[in-house]
Image (tube, helix red, strand yellow):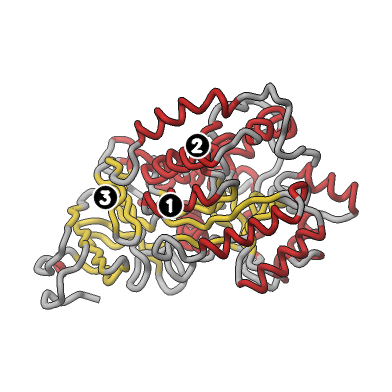
Amino acid sequence: MTPSAADSPADLIISACTVLVHDDQERIGFEEDAAIVVRNGVVEAVTTTAGVADLPAAERLDARGQVALPGLINCHTHAPMVALRGLAEDLPTQEWFNDVVWPVESNLTEKDVELGARLACAEMIRAGVTCFADHYFAMDAVARVVADCGMRALLGEAYFSSQGPEGRERSLEFALRHRGAADGRITTALAPHAPYTVDDTDLAATAGLARAHGLPVHLHAAENRDQTETSLARHGETPIEVLERTGILHTDLLLAHGTGIVDSDLSLLERSDGRTAVATAPRGYLKFAWPDTTPVRALRDIGVDVGLATDGAASNNSLDVWESMALTSLVQKSSEGDPRWLTSRQALHHATLQSARAVGLGDSVGSIAPGRRADIVLVDLTGPHTQPVHDLAATLVHSARSADVRTTIVDGRILMRDRTLLTIDVPAVVRELEERLPALVDRSHGRRVQDYDA
C-alpha cells in the first residue's frame, strides 16, 4: 500500500530503514529502503522511501542504517523487583526465596512498587521493550506508571492462598478495574502465584472467574524439575496435571518458565481449551543452575506459543529481552544438541509474533503491518560489532545489543529518541528509591510474605 500525498498529514513517517516483516506463512523477511506510515497510533502502510517523499507528516524520522522491528515484549516479569537487583546473589532457589526475597517483600509499600516499576519501565524502553506482562503486588501503582510512561502492559495482581479469599478477590477487582485502561494499552489477567502456593480451591475458583469475566490467567507452574518431582511425591500429579484438574488449563493461560514440564504434560497442554502459552527466561535458569530449560521445541510441535521473558531483575539482574532472545537460541541449541535449532529467524519469530500471542495481543502487535498498533523500535547497525552484515537475522540476534536501540515507539508515540528517554526522569526516580532502600531491605523483623517449600 502506498499512501497518497493528498491524504491529511500522517502523524509519523519513518523512512530509509530496513523493516522486519512477516509473510502470510509468518516467515521472517526484510524490506530495504522502506518507510512506515503511522496514523492514529496504527501502522497505515509499509512502503518505499520514495513512495512517501511527498507525503505530509507531523513528524518524520530518517532511519538510514537502522532496522525497524516490532517492539519487543517481556512476557513474564516482576518489574518492581528492580529495587532488589543484586540483593540475593549466588543462592539456591529455596534460600533465595526464604532467606532474602520473601522477607524483603514483606516490607513493600505502594511507593516502593511505583518507583521500582518506573525504573524498570525506563530500563525496558531503553532496551526496545514496548510491552511487558507483570505479575506482582500493589499493581495499582504499576498501572499508574504504565499510563504515565506510555508503555503497553498485561498486568495481574499476584496472590497466595495464605492471604485467604481476599487475595483472590483483590486479583479479580484489579483486573476488572484496569482492563482497557491507559487508552487501551493496559490489559489484565488473574494472577495466582503458583500451584505450590495456591490451593486447589483457589485455582478452581480462579478458573471459573477467568471464564466468567473473559480474563486470562498468568501464573508460575512447573518452574523447575524439583517442583515437578515434589508435586509428584506429595500429590501424585505434576503441576501441569494440577492445572488441568482444577480447570486452569481450560482458560487463556500464560505459564511462566515450564522448565519442569515433562513428556506426559505435553498432551494435556495440547488439548487445553484456551490459548496456552509459555514464557521462557533462560538467564535465570542458568543462574539458579537448574538442570533443564523450557522445552521450546516440544511446545512448538504441539502448537503452544513460547514468548521471551526476563523474570524479575532480582533473579535475572536485567530486564533485557534482547539478551533473552540470544540466550534462548543458544540454550536451545545446547539442550537439543542441534546447532540447527533454534535458528536466528526462529528466535525472531519468538520475539515478535509468538510473544505477542503469549500476552494475548496477537491480533494487534508483534508485526509491522497495516492495521497493527505502531509499536516499533529502531536498531542502529552501524557499529563495528554489527558489521559487516552477511545474515541480517543473525546480526540482530547474536551481534546487536539492547544499547543499539535508538528509538522506541508505542502507539505511534516516541518514548525514546536517539537514546534519550522522553517520559521518565531516571535520576529523580533513582534518588527517591535510594532513600527508601534501607527500610525496604531490612530483614531483622523475621517476616516473610510466603514460605517456599516446593
Q: Residues within 10 Å of mark 2 (few under 14, many from 20)?
A: many
Q: Secondary structure at mark 1?
A: helix
Residue 5 relative to residue 103: left or right: left
Write down the quadrant of residue 306 in the picture: bottom right
Give whichever of 417, 388 is nearer the camera: 417
| Residue at mark 1 to residue at mark 3: CA–CA distance | 27 Å
Q: Residue furthest left?
A: 54
Check residue 64 in the rendering and tell me which mark sits there, or answer none: none
Instruction: Choose the circle earlier in sequence order: 1 or 2.
Output: 1
Do the numbered discs 2 and 3 sit on residues whose CB atoms are within 8 Å?
A: no
Where is residue 311 drawn, in percent x and y?
A: 57, 44
Q: Residues within 10 Å of mark 3 (few under 14, many from 20)?
A: many
| Vertical side of 245 occupied by 73: above or below | above
Write down the quadrant of residue 56 in the picture: bottom left
Where is residue 321 drawn, in percent x and y?
A: 47, 46
Circle 2 sits on which residue? 318
Q: Tell me if residue 279 can be seen.
A: yes
What's the residue type where badge 3 is placed?
A: Gln
Check residue 146 in the rendering and tell me which mark sits there, or answer none: 1
Of labels 1 and 3, the one closer to you: 1
Q: Quadrant of the N terminus?
A: bottom left
Write down the quadrant of residue 224 in the picture: top right
Of labels 1 and 2, the one closer to you: 1
What's the residue type where badge 1 is placed?
A: Val
Instruction: Choose the circle earlier in sequence order: 2 or 3.
Output: 3
Circle 3 sits on which residue? 66
Give whichever of 255, 2 is nearer the camera: 255
State the residue at coordinates (28%, 38%): 383
What's the residue type where badge 2 is placed?
A: Ser
| Residue at mark 1 to residue at mark 2: CA–CA distance | 19 Å
Residue 276 relative to residue 43: left or right: right
Q: Secondary structure at mark 2?
A: loop
